Image (cartoon, rainbow, N blue to C red):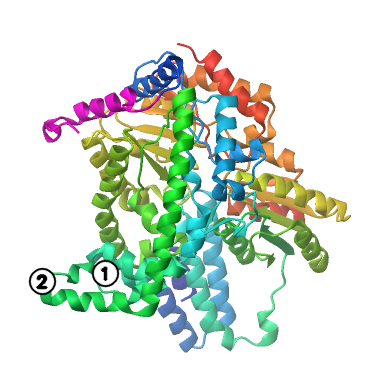
């Protein structure tokens, strides 16, 4: 049954995924096994996204399916089972002056399903808020999103604020439609990524 | 327009529209030099669209809010204080002398948006900092179960469902009856009754006030553009405006997330709605180009870029209706100008569709591989773009100049080419903008 659920999610068969989940639970399958199948499915989808075989609609739909499964499975999980060990915390947000959230949300989602605790600060986030969140959570990774070219300076200001606050072991990644190596240099960020899996790979590398 | 218009071929119609644009009837040019500069610039655009080598490569940056930062005016001031709007645009055009106009109306009247309580956007001073450009707030302004209502009558859907959601002032319009109810005398009285309800009356009063504010704004904005055209001879590159049906639905009706799910959950309805938008998009592009006596109709491409969907989905959901809009505009002699945002490297073989006649479109690219573009576009369509926003902001004038020369050498040599920014120009260093424009003018001679 697990394999059927994996296949249904990977093949974007939303109704089948819901039905199979229900069948598995009705048959007394351990809820953790259902979640493990979801994890494996998401891993495959992540790989396909990285290799250019699946795209944003598939990530969004997979997110929906994962949400639906989690919703029915969660009440059956015991408290201690629910808390999985996380790889580390990533503070993420769209920088000050920019209210675009779609790409940021996709990156946050991919970080989450790849085992990171995600502290999503939302949009139009001032530099001080990033500093505060990194300090509070002890996160070693901060991810700055920006769609506008007017996000360049707020990104630069945020990187400076993090450094000025003495958070020298915090690494900063930046991403967005008009972000490239030149802007990485300009802002002083540690890296930039072209897509959500690049963010996941950077976070894994920095937490390794 | 020509009384024999309907009998003209698309090529003849295009020629006639270019003719009217170059002629600029009624434009009070300040000097013969300004008129000559204007006509030379329009001729360059005509030459590149028709795939010839102009006198030199035209440089037409896609200018956003940059002129205000440059002139020390905030974005908020530009949207409210038309004197400052005019001051900044005058300074930008006089100092940089690009080949196309940064047109005053595109920045919009803040006062009108305020009077209507516009919720679809946040604009400087109203939800985003006074220096930020306006930004769209995506949401499901059209719900997933409203496709049938939309498809049946988009105008009715706009009036009674969509507009009440995106304008606080028009919320009472939900109570209005469809205009198509007004058929015979006995129906009219009943139709008018909701118009008498106090909140509806109030909404129309707000609409009247917004209309008045819009009139003040457009007079000021047109005077600003008129002064640039008549004194500097810089024409607007864009006459009309329309959108790809997928972006119309995805940007401001369903939103990105919802339209992506619709591709899986209700593809048939999505396709029907996209089809429904085709004639509406064509009519909008033709009408606006005709009104402005300029054949070029701007179509910004948003949600079809690489990564947004597979090529298979692009060919199913995005391209067919965009292609239909492009063909519909060309049929009327209008020149569709696709502003291809993001990367289109995976789509180049699809968009270079043999059904689209050569010499009838403009494609400005953002991050696509220009060598690959050139291979496919030479002899088929005018193209350009690709001066990165990052370079204009964080590079040096020398780097910008080298990039521009590199582009002209690699892909500009055969004509049919416009030098332009890949993204809308909001934030940049002035020396870099000078380097882009001046290098193109010096190095881009044929």
Left or right, A111 with respect to B161, comes to right
| Quadrant position of residue B22 | top left
Residue B253 drawn at (x, y percent): 40, 62
Q: Is residue B61 or residue B23 the one in the foreground?
A: B23
Q: Secondary structure under badge 1?
A: helix
Q: Is residue B322 above or below residue A112?
A: above
Distance from disc 2 to disc 1, alpha carbons, whole Å, reads: 26 Å
Say left or right for A152 vs B441: right
> Tag on residue B148?
1
Dot 1 falls on which chain? B
Magenta stretch, residue numbers: B1-28
Q: Main secondary structure of the magenta part?
A: helix
Quadrant location, the N terminus of chain B: top left
Q: Which of the two labelled residues, at mark 2 and mark 1, occupies the earlier sequence position?
A: 1
Front-lying residue, A159 or B138: B138
- Res. B94 visible in picture: yes
Residue at point 22% right, 68% down? B179
Residue B184's disc number: 2
Q: Position of residue B162 (x, y in %)?
A: 37, 66
Badge number at residue A38 = none
């Amino acid at each position: 049954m697990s394999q059927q659920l994996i296949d249904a999610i990977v093949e974007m068969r939303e109704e089948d995924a819901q039905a199979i989940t229900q069948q598995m639970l009705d048959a007394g399958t351990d809820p953790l096994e259902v979640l493990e199948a979801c994890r494996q499915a998401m891993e495959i989808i992540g790989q396909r996204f990285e290799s250019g075989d699946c795209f944003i609609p598939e990530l969004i739909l997979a997110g929906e399916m994962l949400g639906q499964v989690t919703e029915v499975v969660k009440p059956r999980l015991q408290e201690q089972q629910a808390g999985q060990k996380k790889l580390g915390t990533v503070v993420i947000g769209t920088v000050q002056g920019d209210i675009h959230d779609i790409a940021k949300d996709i990156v946050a989602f991919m970080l989450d399903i790849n085992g990171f605790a995600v502290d999503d600060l939302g949009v139009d986030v001032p530099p001080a808020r990033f500093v505060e969140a990194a300090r509070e959570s002890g996160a070693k990774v901060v991810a700055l999103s920006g769609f506008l070219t007017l996000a360049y300076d707020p990104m630069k200001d945020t990187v400076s604020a993090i450094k000025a606050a003495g958070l020298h072991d915090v690494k900063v990644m930046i991403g967005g439609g008009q972000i490239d190596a030149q802007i990485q240099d300009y802002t002083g960020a540690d890296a930039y990524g072209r897509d959500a899996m690049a963010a996941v790979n950077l976070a894994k590398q920095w937490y390794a | 327009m020509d009384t024999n218009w309907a009998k003209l071929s698309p090529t003849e119609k295009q020629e006639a529209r270019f003719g009217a644009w170059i002629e600029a009837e009624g434009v009070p040019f300040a000097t013969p030099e300004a008129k000559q500069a204007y006509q030379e610039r329009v001729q360059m655009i005509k030459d590149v669209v028709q795939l010839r080598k102009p006198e030199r490569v035209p440089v037409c940056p896609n200018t956003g809010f940059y002129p205000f930062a440059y002139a020390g005016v905030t974005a908020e001031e530009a949207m409210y204080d038309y004197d400052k709007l005019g001051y900044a645009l005058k300074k930008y055009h006089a100092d940089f002398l690009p080949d196309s106009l940064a047109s005053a109306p595109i920045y919009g009247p803040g006062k009108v948006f305020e009077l209507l309580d516009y919720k679809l956007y946040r604009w400087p001073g109203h939800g985003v900092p006074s220096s930020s450009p306006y930004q769209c707030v995506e949401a499901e302004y059209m719900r997933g179960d409203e496709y049938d209502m939309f498809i049946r009558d988009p105008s009715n859907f706009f009036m009674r469902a969509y507009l009440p959601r995106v304008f606080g002032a028009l919320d009472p319009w939900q109570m209005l009856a469809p205009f198509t109810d007004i058929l015979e005398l006995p129906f009219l009285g009943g139709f008018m009754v909701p118009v008498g309800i106090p909140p509806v009356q109030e909404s129309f009063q707000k609409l009247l006030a917004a209309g008045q504010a819009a009139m003040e704004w457009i007079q000021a904005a047109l005077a600003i553009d008129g002064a640039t055209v008549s004194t500097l001879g810089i024409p607007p590159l864009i006459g009309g405006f329309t959108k790809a049906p997928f972006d119309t639905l995805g940007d401001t009706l369903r939103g990105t997330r919802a339209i992506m799910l619709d591709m899986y959950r209700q593809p048939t309805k999505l396709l029907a709605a996209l089809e429904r938008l085709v004639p509406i998009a064509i009519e909008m592009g033709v009408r606006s180009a005709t009104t402005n006596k300029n054949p070029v109709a701007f179509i910004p491409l948003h949600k079809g870029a690489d990564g947004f969907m597979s090529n298979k989905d692009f060919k199913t959901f995005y391209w067919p209706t965009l292609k239909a809009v492009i063909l519909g505009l060309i049929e009327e002699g209008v020149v569709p100008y696709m502003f291809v945002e993001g990367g289109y490297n995976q789509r180049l073989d699809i968009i270079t569709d043999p059904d689209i006649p050569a010499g009838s479109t403009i494609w400005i690219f953002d991050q696509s591989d220009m060598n690959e573009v050139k291979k496919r576009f030479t002899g088929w369509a005018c193209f350009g773009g690709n001066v990165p926003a990052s370079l204009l902001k964080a590079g040096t004038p020398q780097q910008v100049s080298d990039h521009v020369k590199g582009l002209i050498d690699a892909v500009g040599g055969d004509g049919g080419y416009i030098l332009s920014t890949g993204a809308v120009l909001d934030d940049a260093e002035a020396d870099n903008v000078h380097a882009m424009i001046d290098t193109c003018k010096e190095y881009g001679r044929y």
